[in-house]
Amino acid sequence: MSASRSAVPFTVIGGFLGAGKTTVINQILRGASGERIVVLVNDVGDTPIDPELIASRSADTITLTNGCICCSLGDEFALTLPDLLELSPPIDRVVVEASGIGDPGRIAQYGTLPGFALDGVIVLADCEGIGRLLDDGRIGHQIADQLRRAHVVAMTKSDLATSDELKRAKARIAEVVEGQGIPILEISNGQIPPEIMFGLGNDHVSELAAATSDSSMFTHGIDVQTVPVPAQVERVLLDQWLAALPEDVLRVKGVVNLADDTAVVVQKVGPRCRITARPDRADEPRLVVISITGTEFSHPDW
């Protein structure tokens, strides 16, 4: 990998069998929007990638019409990851589907290998069946551990559940992850807003205003607000505001010029926050807040 090239974002999608991981992966590949994504799955032959996306297929690889690739994890997962960095044209992102009974947190550790940057762990939970799975004495502890490894929990098939079922499922998940501040999102048809799923490791957010000016890209139940930022901000005030945001704030990202004449990129998913140095001060500093509809939070008093 070229020394000047940024690390490749590495996202893990976990969840028990039937939670909807394949549906989410198909939605990711459909919305690649010019990105060259490599999706790694447990067994590529059994993954029902939408036929119209497929350009060619081999024993362990599916090449897609949009330049993306779907590959089998294989037995030498850690050894083959560096090979992805040598692909030409270069890849923009890696998405890994964790096994239904696997530990997504363990797979996420591979995202810290040289050349990669862990971009987040999304764990899916079937809102109709999550309570039953958690109560199962054989696998309940594994399901709970999966949920606790998440940056974001996405409750799938919410369009098929009643309002009472959704409330019970969310309450049960919240009980499992209590105290960790992990946001819980309701989704349907495998549609997770990309601004929530991706971007924790991406320091290049100079086009935030254009990307978030049209909230129609987001699913029902998600609000996007741009928080104005003054020319410079005291770091302690920024940290205090971020720490005080409620759990239903799913994402915060943006660029801020600090009072010490440095600039930073802010990336927050649930309780996990990264503030990294930016080489140049921002001409238009701003913060974008993505939250569940109806969430109230105070705008910063800079």
Image (tube, rainbow, N blue to C red):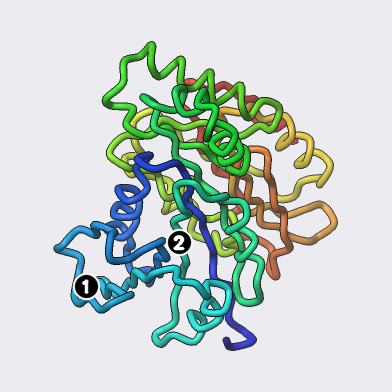
Q: Which mark is residue 122?
A: none
* Mark 1 residue type: Thr
Q: Which residue occupies the foreground of this view, 242 or 94? A: 94
Bin the neighbour count of mark 2 within 10 Å (Cα to Cα): few under 14, some 14-19, many 20 and up.
many
Q: Which mark is residue 65?
A: 1
In contact (CB < 8 Å): disc 2 and disc 1: no
Above or below, comparing residue 145 to residue 68 in the picture: above
Above or below, comparing residue 260 to residue 66 in the picture: above
Q: What residue do we see at 46% from left, 48% from top?
A: 195
Q: Which residue is mark 2?
A: 95
Q: What residue do we see at 58% from left, 24% from top?
A: 174
Looking at the rendered structure, the secondary structure element under dot 2 is: strand
Please indicate whether residue 100 sits to the left or right of residue 65 in the image.
Answer: right
Q: What residue do we see at 31% from left, 34% from top?
A: 188
Q: What residue do we see at 53% from left, 18% from top?
A: 171
Please indicate whether residue 206 sits to the left or right of residue 233 in the image.
Answer: left
